[in-house]
Image (spheres, rainbow, N blue to C red):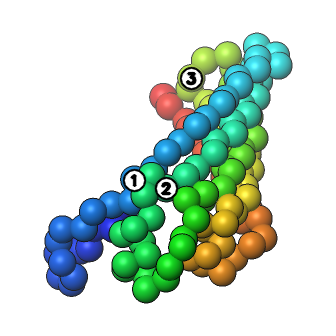
Amino acid sequence: PSLKSSKEEGRPNFVNPGLRLLGLGLDVKVTPELKAVVTANHLDFDTTETLELLLFQSDIDREIGWDLSLGARWRPFLNNNFVVLGGVSALLPGDGFSAIYDEGSALLAGFTNVKVTF
């Protein structure tokens, strides 16, 4: 996570909190045309002192939470000329995320991408 400000406002030098990411992923070839992708990542801040100073909040927990996603890639012609990618992802907030954003419920997002090449 970057705390770097834009050129127009703020100070240019911040010490970023850093990120610890532990991830696990699995790609499963369901059929020759269809591949399923599952990932799970656990996210933590490396240090929280910078965040506590910036937000005027004490005792921010390091845990950001769990990032989970499930997707599929479909290649109906068995080449890369037409590829459809889609799926869903969720962030299950940890104590650190909840302390910063006052958000305790899961955040969900869907995604899709269609690639056509000639």
Q: Position of residue 76 (x, y in %)?
A: 73, 24
Q: Earlier in the sequence, mark 2 or mark 1?
A: 1
- Say which mark, if any, is on residue 72: none
Q: Nearer the viewer, residue 30 or 102?
A: 102
Q: Residue at x 43, y 86 (%)?
A: 56
Per the image, label 3 sits on a secondary structure element best described as loop
Quadrant of the rendered structure where residue 10 is? bottom left
In screen coordinates, is 75 left or right of 30?
left
- Say which mark, if any, is on residue 45: 2
- Say which mark, if any, is on residue 80: 3
Q: Nearer the viewer, residue 87 or 90?
A: 90
Quadrant containing the N terminus is: bottom left
Q: CA distance from mark 1 to mark 3?
A: 37 Å
Q: Residue at x 18, y 68 (%)?
A: 13
Up-down: is 27 above or below 16? above
Q: Residue at x 63, y 45 (%)?
A: 42
In screen coordinates, is 6 left or right of 104?
left
Up-down: is 6 above or below 63? below
Q: Nearer the viewer, mark 2 or mark 3?
A: 2
Q: Earlier in the sequence, mark 1 or mark 3?
A: 1
Q: Earlier in the sequence, mark 2 or mark 3?
A: 2
Amino acid marked by disc 3: Asn
Q: Position of residue 26 (x, y in %)?
A: 71, 25
Q: Nearer the viewer, residue 50 or 114?
A: 50
Per the image, label 1 sits on a secondary structure element best described as loop
Amino acid marked by disc 2: Phe
Q: Nearer the viewer, residue 67 or 57?
A: 57
Residue count near mark 1 (Cα–Cα under 10 Å), binned few <14, some 14–19, many ≥20: some
- Say which mark, if any, is on residue 18: 1
Q: Position of residue 67 (x, y in %)?
A: 66, 50
